[in-house]
Image (tube, rainbow, N blue to C red):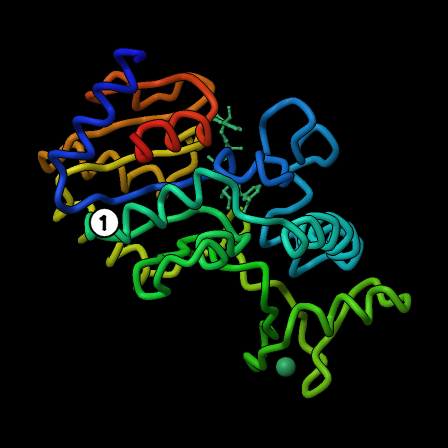
């Protein structure tokens, strides 16, 4: 067997409290493009259009934002967990999973069957929508139906406030309670496995960095190099579903 896989297997066998940190690369094999790879969302859209300040102050920016967001939500709604998501579920079944801290908004860790209390979605979820003024919550599919019937900038039916999916945009405050929990778990885990993330989006990437600094082993599985590779105990540059499935099923 590939010595890197052998090593990864040993890390998992020895670990008792694993923190999985996941990014958009975990879900590309479920058909959801990431941001930065060729063919990813940033090859079609300009990220500068989607800053939170712009979305809330400029109707044209909001129309563009909803076009991008609806397109990616529909892929997420129809996607299925891939073997990497299922391997993470197996880690929970083995009693080794402390938690999954995910940057993903696609709900695929839930769909794979991990317990909701173990999943921390630090960038929120695409599956619900809220009014930024009164807080009223909406089902995403109801909003998508109104977009299908021609609405380009959906507004709240109670107070006419701006509606936005419950995801964190650039420049929008992170949910403080979730970040505090994620950092606490990073300090408690004995193995952190970072999967399919460029590890350049902060403060999210501070979670695996904090785990490593607190004494946990750090394993990174990603197709490309990341800025945290030099602090990791094991780095595998390959397909996350192939590698994780081999490590966990072995
Ligand atoms: P990213 O796009 O910055 O990085 C993804 C990384 O995964 C890249 O380094 C890429 O080389 C790697 N990768 C892609 N497919 C892979 C595969 N099959 N196997 C191994 N590696 C693979 O994504 P990020 O670091 O997660 O951060 C970007 C932000 O994008 C996050 O905030 C997240 O909220 C958002 N996002 C989420 C989704 C989703 O929910 N599925 C999709 C797109 C973007
Ligand atoms: Zn409202």
Residue displayed at 58% across by 78% down: 137
Q: Quadrant of the C terminus?
A: top left
Q: Which residue is mark 1?
A: 94
Q: Which corner quadrant of the image does residue 128 belong to?
A: bottom right
Along the viewing direction, whichever of 199 and 127 lies nearer the viewer:
127
Extreme right residue here? 150
Q: Residue at x 28, y 46 (%)?
A: 91
Give me the residue at 82% from left, 71% from top. 146
* Position in image of residue 244 (x %, y %): 37, 31
Q: Secondary structure at mark 1?
A: loop
Q: Position of residue 16 (x, y in %)?
A: 12, 44
**Compared to 194, does 234 lie above or below?**
above
Q: Residue at x 16, y 34 (%)?
A: 13
Q: Looking at the rendering, in which quadrant would you find the N terminus?
A: top left
**Percent position (x, y) of residue 124?**
48, 58
- Give the quarter of the image for residue 156: bottom right
In the image, residue 161 above or below residue 50: below
Along the line of sight, the residue nearer the viewer: 48 or 209? 209
Q: Position of residue 144 (x, y in %)?
A: 76, 66
| Disc 1 packing (10 Å; few <14; some 14–19; many ≥20) | few
Do we see residue 183 in this rendering?
no
Residue 78 in view (yes/no)? yes
| Residue 212 shown left or right of residue 237 in the figure | left
Q: Total number of numbered labels?
A: 1
Q: Is residue 145 left or right of residue 12?
A: right
Q: Is residue 163 left or right of residue 25?
A: right
> Foreground residue, 234 or 163?
234
Give the image quarter of residue 127.
Answer: bottom right
């Amino acid at each position: 067997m590939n010595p890197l896989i052998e090593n990864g297997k040993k890390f998992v066998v020895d670990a008792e409290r694993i923190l999985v940190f996941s990014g958009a690369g975990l879900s590309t094999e479920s058909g959801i493009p990431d941001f930065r790879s060729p063919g990813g969302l940033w090859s079609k859209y300009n990220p500068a259009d989607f800053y939170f300040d712009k979305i809330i102050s400029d109707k044209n920016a909001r129309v563009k934002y909803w076009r991008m967001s609806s397109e990616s939500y529909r892929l997420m709604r129809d996607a299925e967990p891939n073997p990497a998501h299922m391997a993470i579920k197996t880690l929970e079944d083995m009693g080794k999973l402390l938690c999954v801290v995910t940057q993903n908004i696609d709900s695929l860790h839930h769909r794979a069957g991990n317990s909701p209390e173990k999943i921390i979605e630090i960038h929120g979820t695409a599956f619900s929508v809220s009014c930024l003024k009164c807080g009223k919550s909406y089902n995403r599919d109801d909003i998508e139906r109104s977009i299908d019937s021609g609405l380009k900038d959906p507004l709240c039916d109670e107070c006419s406030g701006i509606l936005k999916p419950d995801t964190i945009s650039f420049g929008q405050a992170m949910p403080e309670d979730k970040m505090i929990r994620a950092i606490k778990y990073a300090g408690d885990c004995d193995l952190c496995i970072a999967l399919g993330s460029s590890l350049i989006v902060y403060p999210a990437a501070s979670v695996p960095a904090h785990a490593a600094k607190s004494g946990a082993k750090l394993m990174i599985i990603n197709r490309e190099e990341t800025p945290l590779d030099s602090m990791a105990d094991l780095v595998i540059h390959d397909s996350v579903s192939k590698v994780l499935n081999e490590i966990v099923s072995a």
